[in-house]
Image: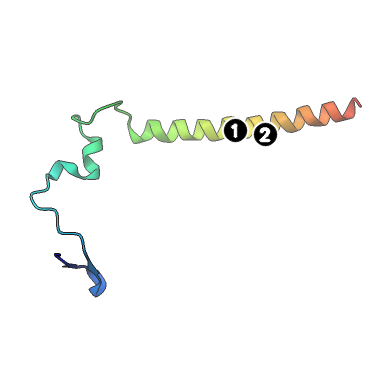
Amino acid sequence: MHCCRVMGGATTSAPPSVGSDSRSNMLWFYTDDAPGLKISPTVVLIMTLCFIAFVAALHIFGKIYRAKAGAGL
């Protein structure tokens, strides 16, 4: 079994990756060769903020609906 030394002096039992391709890191998802949709980080941020606003609006409308339904009883 091959042991590798990592930071702090701890050892791991996994062998180092030999001949690993440089395209197998996280940056590969942001290249033109990546499969799937090509969405910029700005679009992801805008979609996230819209989702948060939508959920907040649902909570507000739910509270208004519950308050009106309770007042009519």
Say which amino acid is labelled 1.
Answer: Val
Q: Residue furthest bottom?
A: 9
Residue 21 quadrant: top left
Q: Residue furthest front?
A: 1
Say which amino acid is labelled 2.
Answer: His
Residue under the point 25% across and 72% down: 10
SS at circle 2: helix
Q: Residue furthest right?
A: 73
Which circle marks residue 59 in the picture? Answer: 2
Task: Estimate the spatial distance between the alpha carbons at disc 2 and disc 1, rounded to whole Å.
Answer: 6 Å
Q: Is residue 23 left or right of residue 36?
A: left
Height in image: 68 above or below 30?
above
Q: Are marks 2 and 1 in contact (CB under 8 Å)?
A: yes
Height in image: 68 above or below 45?
above
In front here: 62 or 8? 8
Which circle marks residue 65 in the picture? Answer: none
Residue 11 quadrant: bottom left
Number of numbered labels in the structure image: 2
Residue under the point 23% across and 74% down: 9
SS at circle 1: helix
Which circle marks residue 55 in the picture? Answer: 1
In front here: 5 or 32? 5
The quarter in which the C terminus is drawn is top right
Residue under the point 28% across and 26% down: 36
The quarter in which the N terminus is drawn is bottom left
Classify 10 Å Cα crowding around label 1: few (below 14), some (14-19), many (20 and above): few
Q: Is residue 57 left or right of residue 42?
A: right
Q: Position of residue 50 (x, y in %)?
A: 51, 30
Q: Position of residue 3 (x, y in %)?
A: 16, 67
Residue under the point 22% across and 31% down: 34
